[in-house]
Every structure is written in structure tokens, then in C-alpha cells.
Image (tube, rainbow, N blue to C red):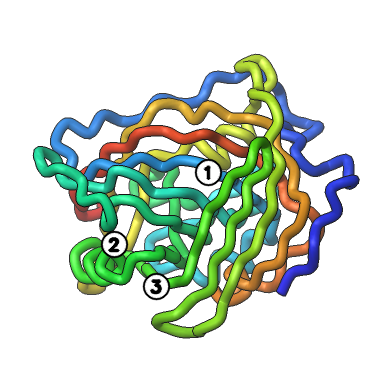
Amino acid sequence: MSGSAASADPTIGSGAAPDQTAGMDAPAAPPVARPIMLHEWSTMTFLHWPYGPSVVQRLLPRGLEVESVDGQAWVGLLPFQMRDVRAPGVPAAPWLSQFPETNVRTYVRGPDGQSAIWFFSLEAARLPAVLAARATYWLRYFWADMSVNQDGRRVRYQSRRRWPGPSGAACRAVVEVDGPYGADELGELDHFLTARYVLYTVVAGRLVYAHAEHPPWPLTRARIVDLEQDLVQAAGLPEPQGHPLVHHSPGVPVRIGAWKRAA
């Protein structure tokens, strides 16, 4: 597992890279007029590490090209709380509609050039949700023992994979949340890593995509107090090096569209 991240490191929680221009607005989400699922993604922490583009590209399906900033690809580890999961017009079931989730993802361009997300893995704490997502949405969901607990400004995330393997792949993170960023403090890299409204998967050997409509993330400063994880390595990537770039958000409501065949 990756070792603990010392909270004294001055790079932790810095929202903008030193060479990026701040004061940029996040790009707007494409509208999803007829969603097939409604979610709320809350208590979200974004942990990101840079990688060589070729290291990430080898794990992508044909038709997707890794997207980079200043010659670096980025891989994210995102623990959060899923809330109010339901289909439109259907009330949320209390137990099934709220659960922790953690995903490992990277950033790509599709055949038509649109910027998007590729998920290496998605951990969720509800087995029925995992089975449904695998069967109907063709995403690489895994069932895991998970928890998200917030005490004041400190958030604790824990996850350990149960099924399918590699069983035992895990993440434990302690994050301390600070004040919000102003719009004039956020720049290209912040939005590159967080303002993502398209996701890809492969269905029956064909590349497909869907839109995820949500408001701009209300981003806050945060720092890692402690981190141990091997979910990134379980995805087939080398162990991330150094401290992650950290963002946090209280959350956004989300409208998920149906799959469309890629060009």
C-alpha cells in the first residue's frame, strides 16, 4: 500500500499548480434532458497523481486517447458518499439509495475529441447496486466494506474490496477540510481534474459514452492527514509517487444519461 501522507507537506491541499492561470470558470455541463438515473455525490474528496501518458494509455481500450496537461496524465482516487440514488419518478429506497463509493479514474479523449472520464474501478458498499451497475451499466464495480465518517472538518474514508478480486484491495484516507476556493483562485488544472461530464465504457466490444449533468463543483481546500491505499495498483498502475493534489467538495446533484455509441 501507499504509505501515509504527512500533513505538514506544503504541497498538500494546494488547488492550483504553480504554472497555471487562475481565475477560470469551470466548463458547463451538457444538459441531460431524459436522465435514466439521479444521484447526489456528496462528501467528495479528489486525490490526484501525475503519470506518464504512456503508462496510462496501455490500460485504455481502443478508441480512447489519454488526455494530459503539460505532458502529464493524471490518475484520480475519489472516495465519496452516494446519496438519493434512484430512477426518475421512483422514490429512493433508504438502504439501497445511500452508500459509500470510491473510484479510480483517468482522463481521456474519445473518438470525436470530447474530454471524458475512464473508470478503472468503482467500489461500492451495496452488493445489489454493484450487481445492477455491472449488469445494466457495464461499469467495473466492485463490492466492498466501506464507510465515510465526518467529525467537524475531518473526514475518514475506509474501503476494503470483497468481490470480485483482487480481494482485499483497500483505501484508508483521513482528510481535513478547510475553507472554500474563490472562483478567481481556480485554474485550468483544477477544472481539468474535476469538471468532467462524460464517461466511457465498453459494451459488447463497442465503445459507448454517457453524459453526467451537474452544477459546477463547490470546491474547498483540503489536506491529507493520512493515506494508505492500493486501489490504484489493483487497477494495473504503478504505485503513485509523492503526495496527491487534493480537492474536496460537499457535493452536487447529478443526472445520468443513457449510453450512446461512440463515433
- 215 sits left or right of 50 in the view: left
Q: Earlier in the sequence, mark 1 or mark 3?
A: 1
Place residue 238 in its image quadrant: bottom right
Residue neighbourhood size for the residue with mark 3, other residues' Cα within 10 Å, grouped as few (<14), some (14–19), many (≥20): many
Between label 3 and label 2, give the one nearer the viewer. 3
Among the two numbered marks 3 and 2 on one chain, the one whose residue lies closer to the N terminus:
3
Which residue is tagged 1?
Answer: 44
Does 10 appear above or below 242? above
Q: Are marks 2 and 1 in contact (CB under 8 Å)?
A: no
Q: Please tell me which residue is depicted at 58% across the width and 54% down the height of the picture.
A: 76
Determine which residue is flagged by label 3.
143
Which label lies toward us, 2 or 1? 1
Give the residue at x 71% y 45%: 245
Q: CA distance from mark 2 to mark 1?
A: 28 Å
Q: Nearer the viewer, residue 58 or 126?
A: 126
- As shown in the figure, which amino acid type bears the numbered disc 2? Leu
Circles 1 and 3: CB distance less than 8 Å?
no
Q: Is residue 243 above or below residue 182?
A: below
Residue 57 on image: x %, y %: 55, 65
Residue 113 in picture, x, y percent from top left = 40, 44
**Residue at position x 45%, y 57% in the image:** 101
Q: Which quadrant, please, contains the N terminus? A: bottom right
Question: Residue under circle 2?
Answer: 207
In this view, the residue in front, 35 or 110, is 35
> Cα distance, mark 1 to mark 3?
19 Å
- Mark closer to the chain start, 2 or 1: 1
**33 or 159: which is nearer to us?**
159
- Residue 201 in the image: state x and y as whole percent: 33, 61
Q: From the viewer's perspective, is 87 left or right of 69?
A: left
